[in-house]
Image (cartoon, helix red, strand yellow):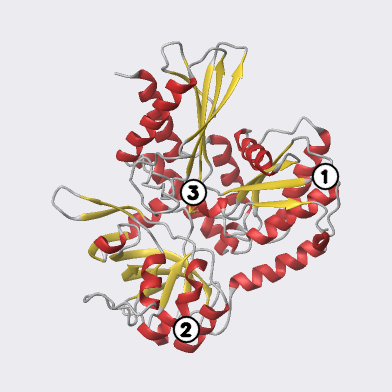
Amino acid sequence: MNVLLDSLLELIRRTSAEIPDDVHRAILTSLENEKKGTIAESAFKIIERNIGLAKNKSQPICQDTGSILFYVDCPVGFDQIAFTETCREAVTLATRKGYLRQNSVDSITGVNDGTNVGPGSPTVHFHQHRASTLQVRLMLKGGGCENVGAQYSLPAEKLKANRDLDGCRKVILDAVLQAQGKGCGPGVLGICIGGDRAVGYEFSKLQFLRLLDDRNPDERLDALEQDILTTANELGIGPMGFGGKTTLLGVKIGVANRLPASFFVSVSYMCWAFRRQGVELDSALGISRWLY
Amino acid sequence: MKILQAPFTEEMMRSLRVGDEVAINGVVYTGRDAVHKYLHEGGELPPGVNLRDGIIYHCGPVVMKEANGDWKVTAAGPTTSIREEPYQGQIIRDFGVRGVIGKGGMGDRTLAACAAHGCVYLHAIGGAAQVLAECVKRVRNVYLLEKFGSPEAIWELEVENFPAVVTMDSHGGSLHAEVLRHSQAALAERV
Ligand code: SF4
């Protein structure tokens, strides 16, 4: 018996079937806030019922079980090659068990071999730390919401967005406007200011690992996060783009240094079916604690 | 909540307006990218599929075969509809489709076809795979399964109380256009 394989399998199962508590709380609050008798309220009620059903039946919350993204914090000297192999095995097994849909396609031939394993799937990001603990986080990121992500290069003349925080605000709100309900809103924005094109998107996704109700330790970014959340929710786009009070459930912003020549703002959109979980593993690689 | 009971007549669909919540009872046929492209290119509907006064559902369901050989839908949320925009209007016209279920809404050509031929766009809740799977009471049949694979095949599904919202009606109304317009104006005041 392979303990690590079992731990990863359980991580995948739970991530796919159960919304993390912080996200669930935000959805419940939004349901309360919507005007009674509106289609926005009905949409939230169905979302809420879906969350309960998926958990009780241990079935995927959404049939698009998404891109499979592992984030691993590991001690120095950890065998990353062996770990990655076990991740791939766990994904294959989870797909066979129906925790994940057969969801990964060869980009040239269009062939879906039904394993979810191939170049770039799953992705495993390692981060070494000095501590002896091993933590594995998993995010399942749907395609519909990934499609409405956007990367802006400042200055963006059409939006009158300059290379400053106000310019960032303008392009981020433009991303919300362009997305409308198409990313299965209400959504959460993960944003990176700066970086090159690749780092920008990568860092924007890392923001989804933060708790939804945490506050940014950087005061300027915290102010921008709160401002965008409030302003976006005044636009009336609402769940599914039906109109309503909740367009976003959260906004998380990080920064990366940039070159003097570039100023990218990268926006990732996460749908309401926000699937992320994490575990801390003990020395025998069993699950000792859930992180969300 | 309005109950839409099959057969879905033109009169029934013309009575619907943007913002109406409906519960659908009867047969719907799934069809997504492969099916739309196939029909657009002149492909024949397999015998047994009748879209006249029928409903197309943009959905790639997860379907399992049970021990007794029956099919069971275990996840059945809508997929993004706009990808079918190049084909939808023609398919509504040629096959007499009365309803299109999907998510995210569609464009002007589909809206025009809805008006011309008495059809509506029904927005299901994106991501609600489990709630919607529960509404599927029976899988009656499947067509083009070998040709297109499971998510892209035409599944004939018997649904009960399938919830959706009319977001494009047969009178030129589109909730998507409306919300876009309002949100654009609201944003302009705030940047
Ligand atoms: S955007 Fe999210 S909720 Fe919508 S279909 Fe994709 S994964 Fe599911």
- Secondary element at tag 1: loop
Outermost left residue: B68
Q: Which class describes the residues within 10 Å of circle 3: few (<14), some (14-19), or many (20+)?
A: some
The residue under label 2 is B15
Q: Nearer the viewer, residue A27 or A229?
A: A229
The residue under label 3 is A48
Residue A37: quarter of image: bottom right
Give the x, y percent position of residue A199. Answer: 67, 38
The amino acid type of the residue labelled 1 equals Ala
Distance from Cα at disc 3 to Cα at disc 2: 30 Å
Find residue A261 and name its label.
1
Residue A37 visible in rendering = no
The amino acid type of the residue labelled 3 equals Glu
Dots 3 and 1: beta carbons under 8 Å? no
Sequence-earlier tag: 3 or 1: 3
Q: Is residue A227 left or right of residue A19?
A: right
Distance from Cα at disc 2 to Cα at disc 1: 57 Å
Report if the beta carbon of the residue with label 1 is closer than 8 angstroms to ligand 1: no
Quadrant containing the C terminus of chain A is top right
